[in-house]
Amino acid sequence: MINVSMKAMLEAGVHFGHQTRRWNPKMGKFIFGERNSIHIIDLQKTVKEIKKVYTFVRDSAAEGKSFLFVGTKKQAQEILKVEAERCGAAYVSEKWLGGTLTNFATLRKSVKRLEELERWEADGIFGVLSKKEVSRLSKEMNRLKKVLSGIRKLEKLPEVMFVIDPVEEDLAVAEARRLRIPIVAVCDTDCDPDLIDHPIPGNDDAARSIKLFCGIIADAVVEGRALHESKQKAPTVEEAEQSMLQTDETAADASQQDQDAAAQQPEEVS
């Protein structure tokens, strides 16, 4: 359940937008006003939107859907990585590789190549190669690790994407839109909210604001996945009816056995 106060948002600087000259007019409905040539975001609307987003993310996770967190700007990288790992989501915190979503088969080939290089290193194959060849392969492996570490376990396309700063991550947004993957994004005053399925108006530059939003989305995923697991463990109506039927049949068999046993008892001689 979401628990975020206006005070927490103020302390995180969620209300600070960009300079007024950098604004996107489509964000006007989320802007409270301006101060010292800086747009101020209406936090009442932020609270309203984050509650709707939380419900969407939680319900999506409860349905067993997969998530991809995206945030490659410096102040977002570590925060996003930690929160994505906490809720078990895939993530991209380094450079977005063109075709990550739209050319997913090629991405999987890169993952296979990384696994191959790691296997060679573990099996000692690097030890019989020349220093020049080892250096080349090591550089390739480290480069692949850097860009694939958060998505190497992504076996299929994500079903929901969460983005910090859709202006910065325009390539990721374009690919998700092309594939009709729902997008949740923290949108600052320079963003176009029409490109986002579930926009959250807020500061997408300040580390504390980024941490707040990443934490909320991760909490929603965690809660939803707990609901999904409980549903998986709970028997369906059909399973419950089948279990009751088997119980009734077992009881009937036991009763018949008792009757048969009683019939076979010798009569008492008076």
Image (cartoon, grey):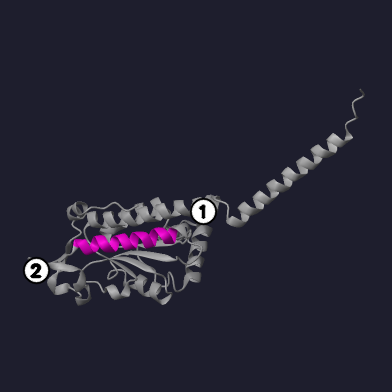
Residue 24 pos. (x, y %) = 20, 75
Residue 252 against residue 133 in the figure, above or below: above
Report which quarter residue 196 is drawn in: bottom left
Give the residue type that dot 1 points to. Lys
Give the camera-side residue of 109 and 228: 228
Q: Is residue 150 visible?
A: no
- Which residue is at the far left? 36
Q: Which mark is residue 37?
A: 2
In terms of secondary structure, where does tag 2 sit? loop
Residue 135 against residue 255 in the figure, above or below: below
For the residue carrying disc 1, how many other residues have a C-alpha within 10 Å: few (<14), some (14-19), or many (20+)? few
Residue 261 pos. (x, y %) = 84, 35
Distance from the alpha carbon under mark 2 to that under mark 1: 51 Å
Residue 182 pos. (x, y %) = 39, 69
Give, as a single range, the part of the protein colored magenta. 43-61
- Which residue is at the far top? 270
For the residue carrying disc 2, how many other residues have a C-alpha within 10 Å: few (<14), some (14-19), or many (20+)? few
Give the residue type that dot 2 points to. Ser
Give the camera-side residue of 15 and 1: 1
The answer to which of marks 2 and 1 sits earlier in the sequence is 2
Q: Residue at x 18, y 57 (%)?
A: 13
Relative horizontal placement of residue 198, taking residue 37 as reference (left or right): right
